Image (spheres, coloured by chain):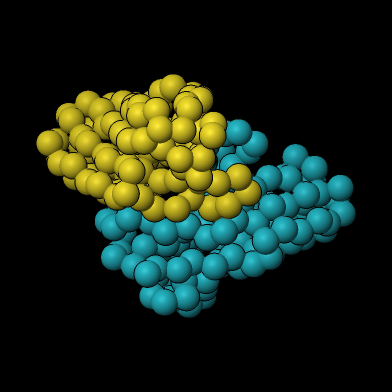
Chain colours: A cyan, B yellow
Amino acid sequence: GAVVSQHPSWVICKSGTSVKIECRSLDFQATTMFWYRQFPKQSLMLMATSNEGSKATYEQGVEKDKFLINHASLTLSTLTVTSAHPEDSSFYICSASPAGATGELFFGEGSRLTVL
Amino acid sequence: EDQVTQSPEALRLQEGESSSLNCSYTVSGLRGLFWYRQDPGKGPEFLFTLYSAGEEKEKERLKATLTKKESFLHITAPKPEDSATYLCAVRIEGAQKLVFGQGTRLTINP
């Protein structure tokens, strides 16, 4: 089956520091990965579409300089939350599809970020 | 504007009590409707994809159906382990991303 892995599962950091979250497709290659954010008891909100070898496409209202996305290979995308603040605390989830952009998405386990 | 609305927001059932979850959508060209299950603190788990009205998919106690305006996730004789949040998402024509509904929190009491 299609497996997407995220690391770390949870991270606690101090306000003002940067945090990097990795998303890997373990058994398939993904030219496109998606990063979502989820607040407690709410649904998933798409933050950005990560494209291998090119710039990410951000959704309206998402700060590009705050949430840096790098998709350096066909199996790895990273999300860096820069100068994190308590309001950035959330559950971040990545997803990818082994069938290209039109197939079903498979999600990682999620990464819970807590900014003190 | 493309919209996905799920109902009810929350549902409590007794073990063995069958029911249905609803996902209504208003989109400009559907290119797939997806059902996911999400357990607390975990990423969504893929369940079904439906592409055209009249299509049905089944997996164990779950059955998903699709019309031109909505999708239903029928759960037959549920067990406590079916307790989770069920998410519906759509992909619209010309887009790669999925748009999610708010989800239905399902609780099955033993």
Foreground residue, A63 or A76?
A76
Q: Residue at x 58, y 52 (%)?
A: B42
The x, y position of residue B33, in whole percent, is 28, 42
Q: Closer to the camera, A46 or B19?
A: B19
Q: Is A78 positioned to the left or the right of A84 in the image?
A: left
Residue at image coords 36%, 62%: A97
Q: How many marks?
A: 0
Apparent side of residue A60 relative to residue B34 in the rendered image (left or right) = right
Q: Dividing the image into 4 quarters, which one contains the N terminus of chain A?
A: bottom left
Q: Is residue A32 above or below residue B103?
A: below
Q: Is residue B2 visible?
A: no
Image height of B100 relative to A23, above or below: above
Q: x, y (%) of residue A96? A: 42, 62
Q: Is residue A62 above or below residue B23?
A: below
- Which residue lies most toward the left here? B54
Residue B42 visible in rendering: yes
Residue A115 is left or right of residue A46, and the answer is: right
Residue B34, image x, y percentages:
32, 45
Q: Nearer the viewer, residue A115 or B75?
A: B75
Q: Residue at x 54, y 68 (%)?
A: A5
| Residue displayed at 61% across by 61% down | A79
Q: Quadrant of residue B69?
A: top left
Q: Name the residue furthest top.
A: B8
Looking at the rendering, which quadrant does residue B1 occupy? top left
